[in-house]
């Protein structure tokens, strides 16, 4: 199987998460806990079979970042699952996909990267797209639920952006090993959180939910991440950025065609602006016209 197909399959798998979460009768934090537990055990088993080892010397060096990134991972899942439960899958996905824009805005402060004129324009367009999505909520009970769901999606985006930024500070560690550690640490940290906020109703989960839990843990987390890391190893950054959009597009298609959730033209326009702007910002081959670049250089 080619690297592109592996990576594309991982994105499509990630894009179907929302459908399965809807059929699990647990709270968002409990779903995050079981997903982390099953996923980490699956990937740890894969590493054992592949005879890959974790360097505990490197773990010690990166310990603080691993713990912080695990907290970000857990928060990301909890708020994203809550967004899926509160609003349409398209709203949850689009608000969640604001994360790359947050990374762009924070990169000058945290990563000391300069914002180009192109990226500044992309941030503005993405924010306009987000306004179209949020501003289309109706003043009714369902409309309020949509806004709350979008809010949870944006909180998930904040945690996901934090995870992306923190991962840039992890040094010399294999991606799969890092993921196993983050999943395991997130699971351990979620145990007391679930205990004090939800209790352990997780033990009373319905038999109808069990297949969906296993698919979420093994399929979306274990197999999904395995395909993700196997595929991206031989891909260029440009290809990874382009293929990553299969994730939100899959979610949008499922929302509209399969779940038949109501999506307005304004929301679709906002989604196009948001996803389009993040794509352009990550695409190095798409540059500003010479005149705009010269104008920017004069102001620096």
Image: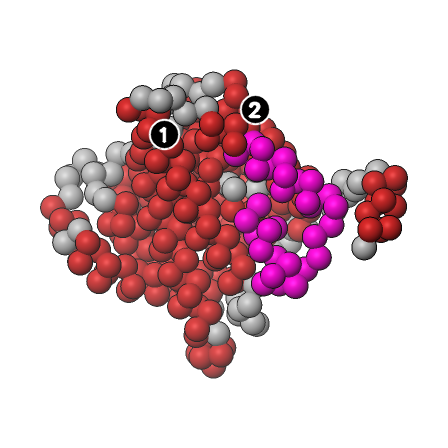
Residue found farthest to the left: 204
Is the C-beta separation of discs 1 and 2 under 8 Å?
A: no
Where in the figure is residue 287, as x and y percent of width and height? Answer: 79, 42
Where in the figure is residue 129, as x and y percent of width and height? Answer: 56, 32
Which residue is rendered at x = 40% and y = 56% of the image? 73
25 relative position to 64: left or right: left
229 relative position to 70: left or right: right
Which residue is rendered at x = 88% and y = 39% of the image? 291
Residue found farthest to the front: 299
> Badge 1 is on which residue?
146
> Badge 2 is on which residue?
269
294 relative position to 147: left or right: right
Please indicate, yes or no, whether residue 131 appears anywhere in the rendered image.
yes
- Using the image, tell me which numbered label, if any, was put on residue 128: none
Magenta-highlighted residues: 101-130
Where in the figure is residue 148, as x and y percent of width and height? Answer: 34, 35
For label 1, the crowd category at 10 Å Cα-Cα, with few meaning under 14, some 14 to 19 and many 20 or more, is many
In the picture, which quadrant includes the C terminus?
Answer: bottom right
Q: Residue 40, located in which quarter of the rendered image?
A: bottom left
Q: Secondary structure at mark 2?
A: helix
């Amino acid at each position: 199987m080619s690297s592109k197909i592996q990576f594309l399959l991982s994105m499509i798998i990630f894009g179907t998460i929302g459908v399965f979460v809807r059929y699990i009768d647990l709270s968002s934090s409990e779903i995050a806990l079981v997903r982390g537990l099953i996923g980490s055990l699956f990937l740890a088993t894969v590493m054992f079979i592949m005879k890959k080892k974790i360097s505990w010397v490197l773990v010690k060096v990166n310990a603080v970042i691993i713990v912080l990134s695990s907290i970000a991972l857990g928060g990301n899942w909890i708020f994203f699952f809550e967004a899926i439960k509160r609003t349409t899958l398209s709203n949850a996905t689009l608000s969640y996909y604001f994360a790359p824009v947050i990374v762009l805005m924070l990169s000058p402060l945290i990563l000391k990267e300069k914002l180009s004129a192109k990226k500044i324009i992309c941030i503005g367009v993405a924010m306009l797209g987000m306004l179209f999505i949020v501003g289309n909520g109706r003043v009714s009970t369902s409309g309020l639920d949509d806004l709350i769901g979008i809010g949870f999606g944006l909180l998930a985006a904040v945690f996901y952006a934090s995870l992306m930024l923190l991962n840039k500070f992890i040094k010399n560690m294999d991606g799969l090993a890092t993921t196993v550690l983050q999943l395991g640490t997130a699971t351990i940290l979620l145990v007391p959180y679930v205990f004090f906020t939800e209790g352990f109703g997780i033990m009373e989960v319905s038999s109808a939910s069990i297949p969906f839990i296993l698919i979420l843990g093994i399929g979306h987390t274990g197999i999904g991440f395995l395909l993700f890391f196997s595929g991206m190893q031989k891909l260029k950054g440009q290809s990874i950025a382009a293929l990553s959009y299969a994730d939100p597009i899959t979610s949008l298609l499922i929302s509209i065609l399969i779940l038949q959730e109501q999506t307005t033209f304004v929301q679709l326009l906002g989604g196009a602006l948001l996803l389009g702007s993040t794509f352009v910002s990550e695409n190095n081959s798409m540059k500003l016209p010479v005149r705009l670049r010269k104008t920017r250089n004069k102001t620096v």
